[in-house]
């Protein structure tokens, strides 16, 4: 017994589930690894860059601070040297001074001496620079020498009042030391300036190199992100769109064995299951359609029964009458034990026999043609496509329905162009379409009406039109007239499957079946099929 669709569907789902959960599949790599691979080097570079920037900014700040301090020391050393120059000038001019000027010179010397002492105290000991210990030691030694000489000058000029003449060596030595201190401060200032410029240049170069490396790493991270994430996501989005449009034969490319690759494989498996289900559903629909087609064809054969019985009974009655006449003459001759009844006139007997045999042959051929048409109509579809001349098939169907039309008082007007090219199709299916349309037109027509059947070529198509002038199709069901079980006939007179089956047959042949209302009322069904090239 054939397995049902639900069982096959359940088994396919179970098999797919088992395959998905039991098969180990390829080893996947996480996108987290890609994320950290792209982000971690950039993060480490940024942290190292920030740390080095802080160190270099501290160095620049230190050099700038040292330069500012040295600038102050230079100004103080110059001021100290100026004060000591003033003392040295008075000391050198002391021998030539008048007594009155001597007192003024002593006062000015004390003033210079006090100012120099304040400047020396403000100068203080030199701050030791870890990078330059020797210059700082030398500067401290010079400051100590200046401090000693100033103390000696204070002792001579203020405490002992020995006079300016005895202070010349000390004033000269203090002045020279002050000038040497100013030169040393200027030299250190220049050094600190050079260091500041060098550290500033190093900082600018480091920032430029760091920015370039960071830009390159950022570009590499963006390229990796696009290649591993954005590109697969775009492909998945496009695949989902195409699958949503019904393209179930789509094959997805798995570029990397990660979460997105697993998603692509899952989507591919889902697409395969959908395709299998769709194929199974289409197969079931085709089977049900064929069953409905066969059922409808058998029902139509029942409708043909009356016409076929009339078409066959008339010839059979003529055949039976002729046979009975011949048999009756033969029986009369045998009853008399003599020659046949027409023995006296052999020519007349032969003529009568010839007439009877001609009638029998003619009516037998008529029966054969009727049964042949009936068998052609009832023959199951082969599923193959072959050249079909639509005008011939329509003529055969019209011949079968001619008795029904005569009995209903409806005239069949055939306009079948003989030069119409063939179409590619199944003859049985196309006869079914023609029969359904003609039968519906006859049922819709009233006594004394007419049904027009036209077959001709329009452009690259062959067109069949069946037009009646009956009650037409109601507006509320006009849009649903090709749906199953939709009918305008009274209950019990129709199943509502004829037009639905005809529409499917025409669609399967690559054509179209449409309904429109003629100007005189009624309905006109138009079948358009592509001509055979």
Image (spheres, helix red, strand yellow):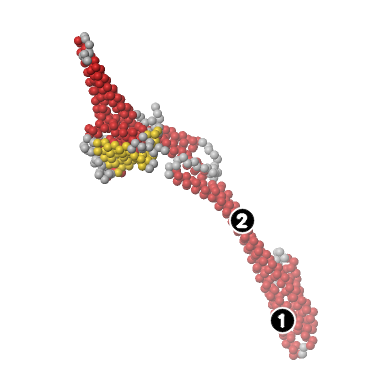
Which residue is rendered at x = 74% and y = 86% of the image?
Answer: 105
Q: Quadrant of the C terminus?
A: top left
SS of the residue under disc 1? helix
Residue 159 shows in this picture: no
Q: Nearer the viewer, residue 135 or 41?
A: 41
Q: Nearer the viewer, residue 387 or 513?
A: 387
SS of the residue under disc 2? helix
Determine which residue is flagged by label 2: 213
Residue 474 horizontal/vertical position (percent): 26, 43
Residue 132 horizontal/vertical position (percent): 72, 65
Q: Which mark is residue 112?
A: 1
Residue 400 horizontal/vertical position (percent): 28, 31
**Residue 377 sits above or below residue 233 on the image:** above
Q: Quadrant of the N terminus?
A: top left
Q: Judge left or right: residue 318 versus residue 106.
A: left
Within 10 Å of the Cα at label 1, are there few (<14), some (14-19), or many (20+) other Cα atoms?
some
Q: Quadrant of residue 381?
A: top left
Q: Judge left or right: residue 378 versus residue 346.
A: right
**Residue 223 sits above or below residue 396 on the image:** below
Q: Quadrant of residue 470?
A: top left
Query: How far, Cα to Cα, is label 1 from label 2?
Result: 61 Å
Q: Judge left or right: residue 280 versus residue 70.
A: left
Q: Quadrant of residue 61?
A: bottom right
**Residue 325 sits above or below residue 527 on the image:** above
């Amino acid at each position: 017994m054939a397995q049902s669709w639900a069982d096959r569907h359940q088994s396919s789902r179970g098999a797919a589930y088992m395959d998905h959960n039991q098969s180990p599949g390829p080893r996947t790599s996480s996108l987290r690894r890609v994320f950290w691979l792209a982000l971690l080097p950039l993060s480490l570079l940024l942290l190292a860059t920030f740390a080095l920037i802080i160190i270099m900014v501290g160095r620049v700040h230190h050099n700038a601070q040292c330069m500012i301090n040295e600038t102050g020391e230079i100004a103080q050393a110059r001021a100290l040297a100026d004060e000591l120059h003033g003392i040295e000038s008075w000391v050198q001019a002391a021998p030539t001074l008048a007594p009155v000027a001597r007192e003024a010179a002593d006062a000015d010397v004390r003033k210079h001496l006090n100012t120099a002492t304040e400047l020396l105290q403000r100068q203080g000991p030199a701050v030791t620079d870890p990078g330059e210990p020797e210059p700082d030691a030398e500067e401290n030694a010079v400051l100590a020498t200046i401090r000693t000489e100033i103390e000696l000058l204070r002792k001579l000029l203020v405490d002992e009042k020995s006079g300016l003449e005895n202070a010349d060596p000390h004033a000269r030595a203090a002045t020279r030391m002050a000038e040497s201190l100013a030169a040393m401060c200027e030299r250190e200032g220049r050094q600190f300036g050079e260091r500041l410029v060098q550290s500033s240049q190093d900082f600018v170069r480091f920032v430029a190199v760091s920015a370039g490396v960071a830009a390159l790493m950022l570009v590499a991270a963006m390229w990796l992100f696009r290649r591993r994430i954005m590109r697969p996501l775009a492909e998945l989005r496009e695949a989902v769109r195409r699958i949503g449009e019904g393209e179930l034969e789509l094959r997805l490319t798995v570029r990397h064995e990660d979460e997105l690759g697993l998603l692509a494989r899952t989507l591919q498996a889902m697409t395969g299951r959908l395709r299998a289900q769709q194929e199974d559903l289409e197969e079931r629909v085709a089977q049900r359609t064929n069953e409905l087609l066969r059922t409808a064809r058998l029902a139509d054969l029942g409708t043909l029964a009356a016409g076929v019985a009339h078409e066959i009974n008339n010839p059979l009655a003529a055949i039976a009458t002729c046979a009975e006449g011949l048999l009756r003459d033969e029986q009369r001759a045998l009853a008399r034990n003599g020659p046949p009844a027409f023995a006296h006139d052999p020519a007349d007997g032969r003529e009568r026999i010839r007439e009877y045999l001609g009638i029998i042959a003619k009516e037998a051929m008529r029966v054969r043609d009727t049964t042949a048409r009936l068998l052609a109509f009832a023959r199951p579809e082969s599923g193959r496509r072959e050249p079909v001349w639509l005008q011939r098939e329509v003529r055969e169907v019209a011949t079968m329905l001619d008795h029904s039309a005569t009995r209903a008082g409806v005239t069949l007007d055939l306009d079948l162009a003989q030069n119409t090219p063939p179409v590619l199709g199944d003859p049985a299916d196309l006869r079914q379409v023609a029969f359904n349309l003609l039968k519906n037109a006859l049922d819709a027509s009233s006594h004394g009406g007419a049904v027009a059947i036209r077959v001709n070529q329009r452009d690259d198509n062959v067109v069949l039109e069946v037009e009646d002038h009956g009650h037409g199709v109601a507006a509320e069901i006009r849009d649903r007239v090709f749906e199953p079980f939709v009918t305008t006939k009274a209950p019990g007179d129709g199943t509502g499957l004829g037009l639905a089956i005809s529409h499917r047959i025409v669609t399967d042949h690559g054509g179209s079946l449409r309904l429109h209302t003629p100007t005189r009322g009624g309905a006109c069904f138009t079948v358009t099929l592509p001509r055979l090239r």
